[in-house]
Amino acid sequence: QVQLQESGPRLVRPSETLSLTCTVSGYSISSGFFWSWIRQPPGKGLEWIGSASHTGSAFYTPSLKSRVTISMDTSKKQFFLRLNSVTAADTAVYYCAREWRGDCFDNWGQGTPVTVSS
Amino acid sequence: QSALTQPPSVSGSPGQAVTISCTGTSSDVGSYDRVSWYQQPPGTAPKLIIYEVTNRPSGVPDRFSGSKSGDTASLTISGLQAEDEADYYCSSYTSTATLVFGGGTKLTVL
């Protein structure tokens, strides 16, 4: 059974970098699949941020591509999100998920709320 | 890329059927049979209920079904139950190898 758990600071100052970690259990992230970050602003819908694989391939949503990096540490069974130069618009619940079959998300973390505020 | 278009809300009575639409473009829904649907009860993470237009993951009741015509995909829930009350999101693969979600639809069971 695949389980994912997000962790990281819940408060980030404007213009600083948001950094989150997703720890995966029940599956080796070096065995395949893409691993993804998705966010949901308060009271709003889901937004795919991007996905990456252990081979180094990564894909990002165009509106965030200049500010986002997804990386992985297969030895620690973790993957990471870095989002630079944050503003209040980046306030959201951030989910990590496994991308299955290249086009959907079959396992999700519980989500972690992040607020951007001074 | 623009979000896929979903109605903000739909409603139905127990036992009835409801359909939620998801409209994209020829660059996403219209070109690929790679549409998925997610159910998100309040305060919880989304759950995959339909993948690749018509397929249900193991454990998802057959009351949930998906279809597609042109640039519009649809999720139908038959035999509506109180526990189906949730937000529903569609998602599609796109021509730029990215993924895009719909704006979400709130289902109310009357």
Image (spheres, rainbow, N blue to C red):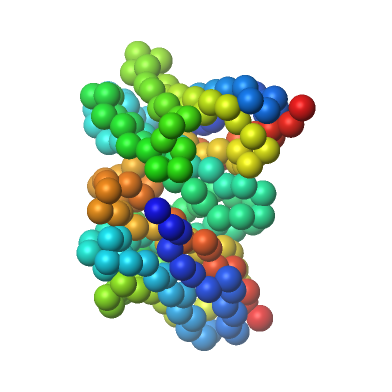
Q: Where is residue A17 in the image (x, y as percent from the top left)?
A: 58, 22
Tell me if A87 is positioned left or right of B30 in this view.
right
Q: Where is residue B86 in the image (x, y as percent from the top left)?
A: 58, 64
Question: Is residue B19 visible in this depiction of the protein?
Answer: yes
Identify whether B95 is placed above or below B85: above
Q: Which residue is at the far top?
A: A75
The residue depicted at 32 percent of the width and 37 percent of the height is A59
The residue depicted at 37 percent of the width and 21 percent of the height is A72
Identify whether B54 is placed above or below B97: below
The residue depicted at 43 percent of the width and 74 percent of the height is B21
The residue depicted at 69 percent of the width and 25 percent of the height is A13
Could you say which is closer to the camera, residue B24 or residue A107?
A: B24
Locate the C terminus of chain B by quadrant: bottom right
Could you say which is closer to the camera, residue A33 or residue A19?
A: A19
Q: Which residue is at the far right?
A: A118
Number of marks: 0
Q: Position of residue A70 (x, y in %)?
A: 40, 27
